[in-house]
Amino acid sequence: MEWLNEYEKLVIRMDTPKVVIDNAVCPTATLVQVDSARKRGVLLEAVQVLADLDLSINKAYISSDGRWFMDVFHVTDRLGRKLTDDSVITYIQQSIGTWNGPSKPAALEGLTVLELTGADRTGLISEVFAVLADMSCSVVDARAWSHRGRLACLVYLRDEDVVAASVERIEARLAPLLRGDSEASGGAVAAVPAGSIAHADRRLHQLMYASRDKERAFPTPWVSVESWAERGYSVVTVQCPDRPKLLYDVVCTLTDMDYLVFHGTIDTNAGQARQEFYIRHADGSPIRSEAEMQRVSQCLQDAIERRSFEGVRLELCTPDRPGLLSDVTRTFRENGLLVAQAEVSTKGDMATNVFYVTGTTAGQAVQQNAIEAVREKVGVDCLVVEEHRPQLYQKARGQDDRDDRNGAGIGLFYLGNLVKRNLYNLGLIKSCS
């Protein structure tokens, strides 16, 4: 059976993505090239690893010949510098190359996650944390997103607290809050082991997608979907202000909607992003109906908007204590602040809580007196206040047309011959040389 073991090893090696990181080819960015004989999930895993490291993907090229797939990313840190830290480079190679993804922190062991969805309103987060504090459930970590009047939240609790309070009692207390005044609001709460959630941001996207208003139609100025029947593809184009994790949010949504990206180009310039994807269903067929095209456009528009709001970022670093989150979020509610996003974490005896807030109506400006009231309540030295504007600057009007005529974003500093040939055959680049 020795020959069989060697054959299995060969199959594993062929099936495992190969990761090459090059700092010599491009003067302004580090190139991360991922080759794989498999397509499903490889692109998302690669983008997820880079996003979790807080890296910027300035350009990317995606291509395949039906049997082999290659993704190339032009990457910098947030300050626009190439990657020089050997530990970061090794982590990228090991995380993507071994196909295990980022290892789960040991701190997540022994935790239960509450998945919450419902109709959002001012003070809902505060009420949720107040109930958990009343039931002596310590919040170890939490993530919350609010968009289009819907809330999705992940709350990590210690297993022993959940057992003492009982899952049934926790769900019974929280469910009415999430339903609000209407049974039709679709509020829900579920308790799952922390290990069952591979990635918090992806799970939040999934919860928001599942709880969306399927009957509601809205414009999608940042996304278009067209058919390319001659090649058997559907073409998805995203043009919007650039921001951190934009590519991750788009690829995550396409993957969870069961589409495969066969080819694509991503380019950023002067604060604007242009992303083009050539997709098919998992069974190899393109999108065939206008209704499905509209659904894809709206789901991608939603995914982009969830982290694109403007407001105020409040970061609170303070010793942890029972009821801290309840007290802080109650202060927000009393001062007319709506929590659009929340990132809560604890390490040892310290709590680091980041809240992105707007006025009582999503997108409404935050009044300075509300911020001062929060400062006074939680402590001036504990709170850091920043304006949150994901769009740093916009491209001058008319610049997009000039870039298109000049071929901006199409020039390829370096790619393997496979990627060049396929992008050229698709008409995505002007030269194969």
Image (tube, rainbow, N blue to C red):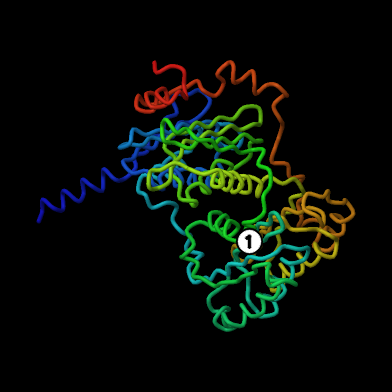
Q: In this view, does 134 lie to the left or right of 284?
A: right
Taking the spot 63% from the left edge, 73% from the top edge, the residue there is 138
Q: Is residue 154 left or right of residue 19?
A: right
Instruction: Give the quadrant of residue 188.
Output: bottom right
Q: Where is residue 293 in the image (x, y as percent from the top left)?
A: 55, 43
Taking the spot 83% from the left edge, 48% from the top edge, the residue there is 365
- Of the pair 205 and 82, the residue shown nearer to us: 205
Q: Residues within 10 Å of mark 1 (few under 14, many from 20)?
A: many
Q: Position of residue 60 (x, y in %)?
A: 49, 32
Q: Mark 1 points at which residue?
A: 152
Give the vertical position of 51 relative to 186 (above or below). Answer: above
- Of the pair 50 and 336, the residue shown nearer to us: 336
Quadrant location of the N terminus in the rendered image: bottom left
State the SS at label 1: strand
Instruction: Give the quadrant of residue 57.
Output: top right
Q: How many marks?
A: 1
Q: Where is residue 201 in the image (x, y as percent from the top left)?
A: 56, 54
Taking the spot 21% from the left edge, 45% from the top edge, the residue there is 10
Amino acid at circle 1: Ala
Quadrant location of the C terminus in the rendered image: top left
Q: Where is residue 132 in the image (x, y as percent from the top left)?
A: 67, 75
